[in-house]
Amino acid sequence: MEASISMEIVHPHAAGVDIGSRSHWVAVGQSEQDVREFGVFNQDLFAMAEWLKERHIKTVAMESTGTYWQNLYAVLVAMGFYVILCNGKFTKNIKGKKSDVMDCQWIQKLHTLGLLSGSFLPDGKTEQLRTYCRHRSNLLHAAASTSKKMQKYLRLLNFRLDVVVKDICGLTGLLIIREICNGETNPQKLASLRHGNCRKSEAEIASALQSNGRKDYLFALGQELETYDHLQLKIGQCDKEIAKMLEEIIGSDDNKREHHLDPKPHKRIHKNTPKDIDLNLKSYQMFEGTDLLAIKGMSYATVLALIIEVGIEGIRKFPTAKHFASWLRLAPNNKVKYYRVKSPREATGLKLRLEMLPMP
């Protein structure tokens, strides 16, 4: 007698979507007529939603492919479907020759049997705030790259500003660079721009500012300075949008708005922290009375990351603190065999994985 294994159907009205850059393949069953291809334009997404309603679909599973899934996800959720976004590594296990038809049917089969779990997604307001902050982070990386290029051209001009100041984009460094780009070459005049908090004396700074007069390097330095100033302007605009978004979120919630907290003057504020935003107060209000900065080791950057990547509603999605720590990949990865730990591997470092899985 042959043994058979049957699996219980968990989601009887389920569909699977294989996300593509130019078209999406949808399966509502395992037969050929249960598969259709739709385009990626807005009218195509609504046509897909109407077709799914005609087939009495209630829940949809889709792969997280780049950023192509986001518009379809928003349309399906707005049309009343329960949508789960799956990590591609959990749906790429099919053997044999792959095709779009086989992929969407495989996703549909897994979802019907309840074998797929959805990735973490923040709420709508947090997602919008995250967009501003991630764009700001990209601008900061670009500004850091520009700073390195300025340092290179200063070195080629024989201006060893990086030796006598801690940060060439600090108060002293930028004043000197601007004068250099304006044509000033006198070391004493350049050194006189030294800020009072600078550790090096004017004589030490002047000795490091002996130019070789290369005009090509000077031109390139001026170009990089203009790029740096432009990026700083864009970062400032992002700060204003972030502040506006925080005010909108807090102002629309009475529970958040009623909380107030005294400032923490002992907390060091990094120069890349958003300007004109009291993150001490805003984080206290966003998390409804929880003082995150009272935790030892928490910085403004970490608090901002928690606000934009998870949010209070996102944290509530995790049943326990252990679940949250595991999602952050801060939990040990222990290989256990016969009730004995065979290969313990602790999480390397404390780098928070505070982006959505998958990253859009």
Image (tube, rainbow, N blue to C red):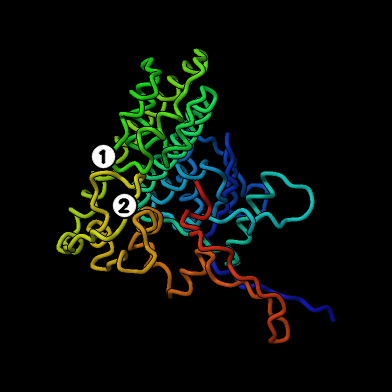
Q: Is residue 18 left or right of residue 73?
A: right
- List x then y, in percent, for residue 173: 38, 33
Q: Position of residue 124 (x, y in %)?
A: 35, 51
Residue 128 placement, left or right of 164: left
Instruction: Check disc 1: other Cα within 10 Å, few if <14, some if 14-19, many if 20+.
Output: some
Q: What residue do we see at 53% from left, 29% from top?
A: 152
Q: Where does residue 338 sit, x and y in percent of width and height?
A: 73, 86
Q: Nearer the viewer, residue 235 or 338?
A: 235
The residue beneath circle 2 is: 269
User: 211 left or right of 16?
Assistant: left
**Mark 1 residue type:** Lys
| Residue at horizontal 52 percent and vertical 67 percent from the top | 330
Q: Amino acid at mark 2?
A: Ile
Q: Secondary structure at mark 2?
A: loop
Q: Residue furthest top?
A: 215
Q: Which residue appears farthest toward the front when viewing the image?
A: 203
- Residue at the far right in the pictured view: 1
Q: Based on the displayed image, in which of its 4 quarters is residue 201 positioned? A: top left
Front-lying residue, 192 or 28: 192
Quarter of the image that includes the N terminus: bottom right
Q: Disc 1 and disc 2: Cα gap in Å?
A: 18 Å
**In the image, 164: left or right of 34?**
left
* Residue at screen point 44% across, 29% down: 207
Residue at point 43%, 74% (across, down):
321
Residue behind mark 1: 240
Task: Tell me how many marks there are.
Answer: 2
Vertical comparison of 10 with 303: above or below = below
